[in-house]
Image (cartoon, rainbow, N blue to C red):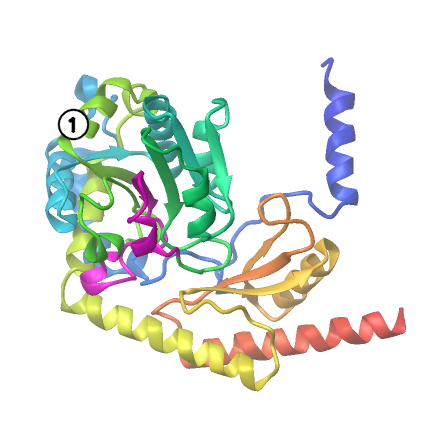
Amino acid sequence: MHIANQLSSQLNQLRQQHRYRTLTQRQSSEVQFGSNDYLGLSSHPRVKAAYAEGIHQYGTSSGASPLVSGYQAPHAYLREQLAQWLEREDALLFSSGFAANQCAMHVLAPMYQRVVLDKLSHASLIDGVRHFDHWKRFHHNDVAHAKQLLLPKEANLLATESVFSMDGDRAPLTELAQLQADLWIDDAHGIGVCGDDGRSVAGQLTAAQVPLLTITFGKGLGVMGAAIVGSSLIIDYLTNHAREFIYSTAMPAAQALAVSTAIDVVANTEGTTLRQRLNDNIGYFRECCRLHGLPIGDSHHAIQTLIVGEDAKAMAWGQALKTHGIQCGVIRPPTVPRGSSRLRMTIAATHSRAQIDHLVAALVASRDSLDRAEITS
């Protein structure tokens, strides 16, 4: 293969920089603090039963793209359910949040004279617009800078996240909604866990204020897939132009049934109980970190970060946690800025106080061990 030497050289460079990535099999013996399944719905009896019943009734695959023969009754119901729950006109289903963001941005960006994204917007939004020349990035959560980048008296699109995936901080949605731009919110980490009835952005702002929402199903809803939610006109246009939608096999009907069931759980009293349990666990974890002098970030979302700095030290800390039976994310550049490698821990409603105590004790022990190693080196 002609490019073998070039590939090997670049991979070796990543290894030397402590940025080489490998697939690591998840171990059932480890306590999981790296999952985005914030409410534990992936293991909820009703959600699993709906998935199983869907497989029994519809099989394991939709068998075709949505516009051929892959669109079935559970897909239609989920679209209607999302529109009603989030008080929008329609929704379009995708295989993943990345596919939804990337292709919708690629299709819609040419309709605007200026596209403006938060500096820390998800890679999928950036990949959807990066090949155009009329987009800008504003300083993270800086409303004044965003306003400065918009073109007066022109069509502007402004995209950001509701909750940012690497820090757990939240966008100033109300202020952004007042700018002269169509606002698109990627609500991946907010839906299900934020706001009344888990409605997150839709519970705060109207369709007129936020014409476009990205809703993912693999985090707070505990399943997989995503939807773009908005006006009937936008959804109709995407149906006819979004290539990832047109040319991909539709999600299995069983999966759509499981997502619908997860929404039922989230939107009712059990969802309220789960969100309260999650918030209690987050508060408990943060207080334990404070008492032990752990420099945890400011987030009050399930996403909790501990900034380490150096790539090698972050990797060493993550490996040390594994010796204590703890799994969490070790995040390095280019996902985060250089010099801000971190441990990314996610707290769930299903974690027990004993498990959180174990995590904090492991963090303290790992910190102390690494500090001693630095002193003696």
Residue 372, percent from left and from top: 80, 76
Towards the viewer: 186 or 354: 186
**Residue 23, image quadrant:** top right
Give the vertical position of 79 relative to 164 (above or below).
Answer: above
- The magenta region covers 171-200
Give the vertical position of 207 relative to 321 (above or below).
Answer: above
Residue 197, percent from left and from top: 18, 62
Residue most toward the front? 152
How packed mark 1 is, by other alpha carbons closer than 10 Å (few <14, some 14-19, many 20 or more), is few
Q: Horizontal placement of 101 versus 48: left or right?
A: right
Q: Horizontal placement of 323 versus 118: left or right?
A: right
Towards the viewer: 63 or 278: 278
Q: Horizontal placement of 47 versus 164: left or right?
A: left
Residue 210, percent from left and from top: 25, 44
Residue most toward the right? 377
**Residue 283, image quadrant:** bottom left
Q: Residue at x 34, y 23 (%)?
A: 107
Disc 1 residue type (three-letter): Leu
Q: Quadrant of the N terminus?
A: top right
Q: Evaluate whether residue 124 shows in this view.
A: yes
Residue at which label 1 appears: 233
Residue 54, percent from left and from top: 17, 42
Q: Horizontal placement of 23 versus 1: left or right?
A: left
Q: Quadrant of the C terminus?
A: bottom right
Check residue 202 for magenta coloring: no
**Residue 236, image quadrant:** top left
Check residue 199 for magenta coloring: yes
Q: Residue at x 34, y 71 (%)?
A: 278
Q: Which residue is drawn at 37% across and 39% down?
A: 158
Q: What element carries label 1?
A: helix
Q: Which residue is drawn at 36% across and 34% down?
A: 152
